[in-house]
Image (cartoon, rainbow, N blue to C red):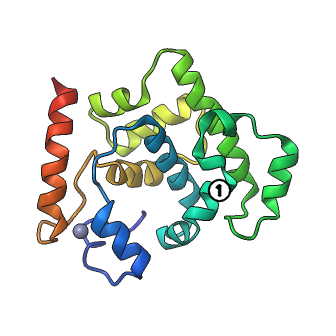
Amino acid sequence: MAQNFTTWCEVEKNPLETSYHDQRWAMPITDKQELFALLMLECQQAGLSWAVVLKKEQALAQAFLAWDPQALAQMSDAYIEELKDNPEIIRHTGKIIAMRSNAQAFLRLEQQGIDFSHWLWSHDLDAQTLSKQLKKWGFKFVGPTTAQAYLEAVGKINPHHPQCPCYARVEQAQQPVKAKYQA
Ligand SMILES: [Zn+2]
């Protein structure tokens, strides 16, 4: 989400956005596969509204093989050609191809013995640092705006407005996760 994070709680939202805001936004995610899936969704968002991504979330998951990095890394050129004509997804050639190269980058991390979840949670990261590191690892569509949205989405920070009903619940959910990885 590129929205001003101090006010997204307050602005008018469509039902999908409301449900995402109320139930998922900034609730901490530590599962590696879920972290990868959400990173890919944020890459898909680059330059678009989060509402578009939410609307297409299921179609994207279906087209991109349930965000399974192993399967994505092996997408054939023919399959990528097919995806370019799929009206259900975001038809951006660069982004479609990046889903394969990002999956390959993710798998390379594993081969290097880097557990992405552990790395993410045990480092103090701002958007610039995260963006730089992801690019260094070979990820595409991971500029600072995307990185900022990702840090919010996975619950590394609490972007809810202190007056938002979600603020305290998210804070409570994040604390034990942060404590665990800082120990
Ligand atoms: Zn909120």
Residue 40 visible here: yes
Q: Residue 64 in the image: state x and y as whole percent.
A: 66, 50
Which residue is at a point 62% across and 38% down the rendered structure image? 102
Residue 143 visible here: no
Seen in the picture, residue 73 relative to 148 is either above or below; the reply is above
In the image, taking residue 115 as reference, residue 110 lies left or right, namely right
The extreme right residue here reads: 78
Mark 1 packing: few (<14 Cα in 10 Å), some, or many (20+)? few
Q: Residue 135 in the image: state x and y as whole percent.
A: 54, 35
The extreme top residue here reads: 112
In the image, taking residue 7 as reference, residue 61 lies left or right, namely right
The residue beneath circle 1 is 62
Quarter location, residue 136:
top right
Quarter of the picture containing the N terminus is bottom left
In this orientation, which residue lies closer to the viewer: 4 or 167? 167
In this orientation, which residue lies closer to the viewer: 36 or 134? 36
In this orientation, which residue lies closer to the viewer: 133 or 177? 177
Quarter location, residue 20:
bottom left
Mark 1: is the Cβ under 8 angstroms from ligand 1?
no
Q: Residue 85 in the image: state x and y as whole percent.
A: 82, 64
Quarter location, residue 26:
bottom left
Ligand 1's quadrant: bottom left
Which residue is at a point 60% across and 55% down the rendered structure image? 61
Q: Secondary structure at mark 1?
A: helix
Which residue is at a point 32% across and 42% down the rendered structure image? 126
Which residue is at a point 40% across and 50% down the rendered structure image? 150
